[in-house]
Each structure stands twice: as structure tokens, then as C-alpha cells.
Amino acid sequence: MFKVENFAALDKIRESLQDKIFSIEGSQTGGEALKEEMSQEGFRAVYVSGDIQMAMVGANTWRGGYRKYSLDTASIKESFQPTSIEADSYLGYSMAVASTTYSPLTIIGAPRYEHTGVVWTVFNNIKRQEIHPYQPQTGEYFGAEVCAMGVDSDKRIDLILISSPMYTDHDGEGRVYVCELSHENVLCHFDTPASIVVLRGVVSDRGRFGSSLAVLPDINADTFNDLAVGAPLENDGQGSIYIFRGEGGRKINPTYSQRIAASEIQSGLKLFGISISQSSYDQSGDGLPDLAVGSKGKVVLLRSRPVVTMTATVSFNPTQIPTQNVNCSIPLASKANICFTMSKLSAINEAQAQVNFTLILDANRKIPNNRAWISKNVREKTGSLTLQLNNETCHNVDFIIEACPDDALNPLNNELRFTFGGLPSGTNLRPSLSPKVQTTSFHSIGFEISCGKDEECVDDLKVDFNFTSSSVVKVGIDELLNVTVFVENRGENSYNSRIILTYPIGLSYRKFTSLRGRIECNSLDSEDGVTRGKTDCSIDKPIFKSNSVAVFVVSYGHNTNSKLDRRIFMTANATSGNIKHIPSTELYKKKEIDVKYSIFITVESSLSYNNFTFGEKDLQKPLKQEIKVANVIRPLNFTVVIKVPVKLGDKDIWEDTSNFTILGCKKYKDEEPGDTDFVGKIKESKILDCTVATCRVFRCSTFMERNTDQTYRISANISSRWIEQIGLSSAKFRLTSTASLEYDNNQYIFYSTTFNNDPPVRKIEAEIEVFPKPDFTKEIIGGSLGGLAFLALLTAVLYKAGFFKSKYNDMIRESAEGGAGPGAGPGAEAVVPAEG
């Protein structure tokens, strides 16, 4: 202490010290630059072939570097203190040495270089590479830790690991880049992002993942070294470490295999993982490597768990699935025997574990297509076993297998999964399962194959089909198109035999009928209007035996509105699960069939009437006939052919025959009758038609929509000239015209109840009645004679009745005889007139 009168004395002391004080980190003016005064030599140290190499992170104004000392003489052999790197870079904050073919390669980190960090490689005391961070971030501390790792046991360095513990991502803080060492070059592939390998921890706002790195010996008995990474700020500063497994091909698995949190070890630990021992020794005396992990105020020693391997087997009884089943409705009872054996990989004599397993039957198929079950709709069986070291432990599972399944060629692939849980035993820790053990395995049970000594079935399938009882598809008439399929196996047993039929758009599957053999069919009609329909039929599943024949009928429906091509085809293709087929096998057939669409057209007419008096030659009378044509089912072009008798012998039936027409029709021709002896035929049948008369043919071509009609009219004067030559003065004749239809017979077929589906020929009839000429002479003479005869007869009757006698003489005579009054007779009393 010293006494001063005022503060001016302090200013003098300050000025004196200012000339002598060293410039410190961050000061840019005055003083002398630091050399090695604050180098912090030994901040990092590595052993290099009998020498020791120590980092000087604070040398040359915190530029950094390192020195190599001989362990024999303690003298400096090499010094690397570059002045080209900027001040405050902290070169030597991390350091690792990798042995190469020619000379050691030093990897040294400078995490404060340009506030992002950089890593140098030094070969023979000369800078070789300068590795900058990928997507640099201010303050990420790239190069805070570097580590040289030999993955396998060949003692060569394979990987260089570089950490950026303060790199912030959306899901955490810190990362470790995995780079390859090729000769004397470190390859991080930062120029090809897809090739970059990065290690990360769990999601954490603050973790400082990568604050420490350490190569571990093979702690899981997979023959590859492992890596420990510290994250001391995870879980609010409690910290954790991560274990990453080495892999074949000089690689490391970027997904951590184990995370050890401080809270799992001891309550109250802080900054667990701030440091990790670079060497792992057996400190506990159990023959397994141990790991020392630093934390705030404590060092934690972690013991390695013993590693075991596991063998899982599944056997079946029966060993093969029978295929010669007579009754396909009864499932087959089977049994699976599941066994586990635990063996040691670490130097231990006892271990105990629990295995939880799940057996999935026919695992490659989805429910309900699986062929085996534990019980109805259940195909999984779970269980638990406790295992002892080197002891086989087993469990039996009963199950059933579908009899006669669709697929009897491909085996049932049964999946076994298990989880492993180590149990403590004696002084040993809980064992862990080697990562090389597959916890999922498949165990197959196959079907019996009866194909001779070579056990290789060579089938010889022949397929054929025909269109049953039909040579044409009648759309709108026949509801079904039946296809009869014939299948024959002329070779050895055929497994999973199927017939696949394809059919055109417009047909729809209806049913199948088995005539011989066990047939099952399912079908899928065309849904997109492009893809053909497909019917898939299994034949005698599971085995279509040698020299067997199957016959079945598949029915396809169509309706009135179905749209098909003029000619359609179907195909039949035979397939099987057999690998080999005899070359002569006839596996494919294709056949075509015509398509005709039904039509229904009605022709209607009413009976007309007219009459003539025989003998009157030049009479003519109007005659009208109507022919109504109606189209019912579908629109189409067609022609109505009308034949009208126009001449009998040499006499015209109609007036002005040359101009005789029908509106809407065209005169086509006149047809002569086949028989000229028309008189006798007409007298017998009283029918005047085209068999006895010359007929005029009219063609009425039209297009008609569905449910529309059209009327044709015959309107002309009929003549009486043709009547006389027949010689019948009194008769009723039928003047008969005809109407028939013509259409495209290749496309259409007439809807008819008759077998031949021919359109009807409609008769258009007119009744012509002939009367004789009237003659009244006979009637007059007969009437006169009849009147005279009647008068004579009447006179005779009156005369005989006394109509012509005088009654006065009789009255006088009666008075003279006695005066008996009128009415006197026997028993009669006389009536005397009273006197006045």
C-alpha cells in the first residue's frame, strides 16, 4: 500500500504499466504481442510413435499450434506454430493423430477461426488440408473435438470425426461430421450433400452434442469398434452420452444404439458427458471393458454388459403338408415347436434372460387369404420363455392348415419375432443381445410333392372351349352366352392349375357350372371400358392330378343395350405353379363368334271392303289400305317391301296401273306369277295374290328410331275388268298384298319366338264381293199366278160356306111351320108376347 494525495499519481502508475503490459485477447493497441507466454501447452496431448505431441492453443496471440517432444530426451523434435492463421483461432483446441502408410497425419481443430471454426491436417510438419464447416454458422465451434477412429480390428484409421457442439438446428444443438481417411486425405464430402454423414442426438434446445468424443473397443461383440459422444447440457444440464456402432465397410451407423442419461445413473449429476476417457480398461475385473465419463465434480465408471447371442428354431409336425386330401372341408391339424438357445460372446459363465415371442402363420399373405390359423380368424401366437445360458428352451403351438388351398405349391412362410430382456444373475449384469442376432426369422413348411425321384413335376396341360349351343351372340334375345371349357392334364401332377378366360367389354360374368372336377371361379368385368374382363378358375385345387380331365361352363350375360363389336373373341389360358411344362402343352386358345342385335318391327293393317256387280266391265271404285310399321327395340335402317297384285291375266286390277304408286316408296319391279292357271286356283281359294297375279314390288327404305312408327298408304281405284275372266258371278274374293322386311342380316336378327328368327310376312287384305246382275221376270209371273190361285181358293171357300145364299126364304119357311120363335128347341119355353 502507498499513500497518494490525489488521483494524478494513479495516472502515472497507469501509464507506466501500459508500456509494460502484454496485449491480451481482444486488445489491438499498445503493448507487446504474446508469443508463448499464454500458450497453455499441453491443452491436448497425443502419443505418437514413442513421442508425445502437445497442443499450444494460446501461442502467438491465441493462433495456436503444437510441439512434439521425445519421451527419451524430453527435447523438442518438431514445432508447428503457423502465423498465417488469424489470431484468436485456438488452433490446437482439439487434436488427433492418424497413422498412415508413410507418416503420421495430425488433425487439429481451431474452433474460433473466423467465429465458425476450421480443421487443419498436418503431414510432415506441413499443412496439407484446410477443412471448413458445411453451411457455416457463427459460433458453431467447428473443430471443437476431433477423433481418429479405426472401425475394424486392422489397426488402421478409417474415419475422422469432427464436432460442432454449438451448431443449432431446428431439432437440437450440436452435431458430429463423419469423414473418411483416404491415404493422407480427409474426405468429408461437403461438396456433395447427399454423401455427408452426420451424427445427432435427441431433440433438445441445448445439448452441446459433440462436446466430447471417444473411440470405444468392441463392446457389443460384433467385431467392430464403437463411438461414444457426449452431450453435457441435455436435460437441463444433467447431460448424457450416446453410443454409435461401427459397421462393416469402414462405416459407422448414424443412428445411435444406446443413450445413457445422467438421470438413469445417479440423481444430481451435472454436465455428465463433458469428457470421456480415451481408453477403456477393465476396472471392475469382470473381463469386460469399462468406460469413465466425466461430470461436474465426479467421474462415473460405466461397466459393459455381457453380450450373448441367440439361436431360434421352429420345427413342424407333420414336416410337410399332405396334398392327397379326399375331404377338402376338414382342416389339417399341425404343431409347431419353437426353441431358443442363448450362448455367450463375452467371457461369462452364467446369464439369464427373458424372451417374448410372436409366431405369425403364413405371414406373407394378408388376412383372410392366409392358409393357416391358430383358431378362427387368429393366426398369431404370443408367448414368453426364461432362458439360461447354453440351455435350449422350447414351446409348442398347435394350429390348423386349410385343406386343399388355392396355392399348394408355395410353402407357408411363418414369421417368428422375439424381443430380448436380460435378467441379472449372480455378480453379472443383465446380458445384452448381440446386434448381429436377427430378431425376426422365417420358417417354412412346404406341401407334399409326388413327382418321382427328381421331385420335379412336369405337367402337360391342354385347354379348349366352345360356345355352347350357339353360333352367334343374339343381343336382346339370349340372356346368356355359355362357354364350355375343357381342361386335360396329360403329364405329371399340376400344382395350382388355373384357367384364365378373357372376354370383351359389354359382357358380364354371371355364373359357372362344374360338370367334372372341383372348379372355383371368380371374375372381374371391365370397369374402365378399356381393359377386357377376366375370369380366373382354379382346377382341382390344390393338385390337378396326372391324366385328369375337368369340364365346366362359364355363363356371361348381356342385355338389350349391350354394345359389342360385330365379331368378338374370347381367350382361354392355362397356367400352373409348375416350373416346367412339356413343350407340346396347349396352354392357349382363342375363338371368335359373330354378334347380332335383336330387332322387333311390327306391321299392321285393317281389312278393306268393296263390291261389284258381275257383268259390269268398266266399273271402278276407290280402295284404301293402310300399313302401319312400328320399330320397338333399337334404331336402325331397314326396308319395307310391299307387293301389290296389279294384273290378273291380261286384265288390270287397278285403274291406271302404270301410274300406281305408294307414297314414300319406290317402284322396284313387276313380278310375274309362278302359275298361269289362275282361274282354277282362284275358284278354289277365292284368293287373289302374287301366286296368281302379276305383282308390283315397292321398296320403302327408312331409318327409324326406337319406339317410333310410320304409315304407308295404298290408295287407288280398283277396276272390275278382272272379275269376268274368273267366271264366278257371285263370290267373295280376298285381294291380298304383302309387306315384308329387309335389313342387314349380318348385324341384326329378328326377335321371334320361332326357332329361325325370320321376320314375318304380313298380309294386307281387301275383301271384294261380286253380285250377279238383277232379273225380275220370274218374280212377276210367279206373283201373278199366285194371286189368281189365291183368289179362286178364297171364292170356293166362301161359296161352300154359303156366303152366296139368300136367308130371307129360310125365314119365311120357318114362320109357316109353327111360329116357333128363334131359339125354340127341346126344353125351351115359349115366350108369348104380352098384350098391350
Image (spheres, rainbow, N blue to C red):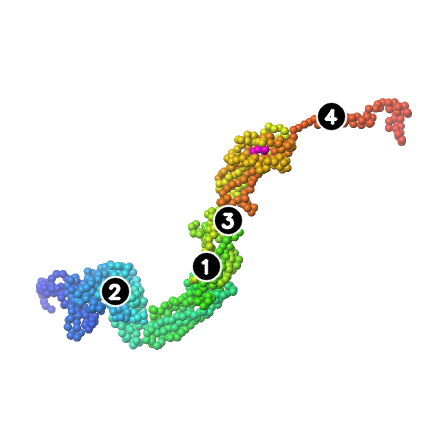
- The residue pinned by badge 1 equals 585
Q: Using the numbered discs, state the Cα–Cα distance from disc 1 to disc 2 in whole angstroms.
A: 59 Å
- The residue pinned by badge 4 equals 784
Q: Please state if 789 lies on the left or on the right of 572 as rendered.
A: right
Quarter of the picture holding the C terminus: top right
Chain-order first, disc 4 or disc 1: 1
Asked whether the residues under the numbered discs 4 and 3 touch, taking CB atoms below 8 Å apart as contact, a structural biologist would say no
Q: Please state if 263 lies on the left or on the right of 713 as rendered.
A: left
Q: Determine which of the numbered discs, if any, sits on residue 180 in the image.
A: 2
Q: Is residue 529 magenta?
A: no
- Viewer-side label of 1, 3: 1
Q: Using the numbered discs, state the Cα–Cα distance from disc 4 to disc 1 in whole angstroms.
A: 109 Å
* Residue type, mark 1 in image: Thr
Chain-order first, disc 2 or disc 4: 2
Q: Secondary structure at mark 2?
A: strand
Chain-order first, disc 4 or disc 3: 3
Asked whether the residues under the numbered discs 3 and 2 touch, taking CB atoms below 8 Å apart as contact, a structural biologist would say no
Between residue 818 and residue 685, name the one nearer to us. Answer: 685
For the residue carrying disc 4, how many other residues have a C-alpha within 10 Å: few (<14), some (14-19), or many (20+)? few
Q: Using the numbered discs, state the Cα–Cα distance from disc 3 to disc 2 in whole angstroms.
A: 76 Å
Highlighted range, magenta? 645-649
Asked whether the residues under the numbered discs 4 and 1 touch, taking CB atoms below 8 Å apart as contact, a structural biologist would say no
Q: Using the numbered discs, state the Cα–Cα distance from disc 1 to disc 3 in whole angstroms.
A: 29 Å
- Viewer-side label of 2, 4: 4
Asked whether the residues under the numbered discs 1 and 2 touch, taking CB atoms below 8 Å apart as contact, a structural biologist would say no
- Viewer-side label of 1, 2: 1
Up the image or down, 27 lies above or below 555; here it is: below
For the residue carrying disc 1, how many other residues have a C-alpha within 10 Å: few (<14), some (14-19), or many (20+)? some
- Regarding residue 213, the answer to whether it shows in the image is no
Chain-order first, disc 1 or disc 3: 3
* Residue type, mark 4 in image: Ser
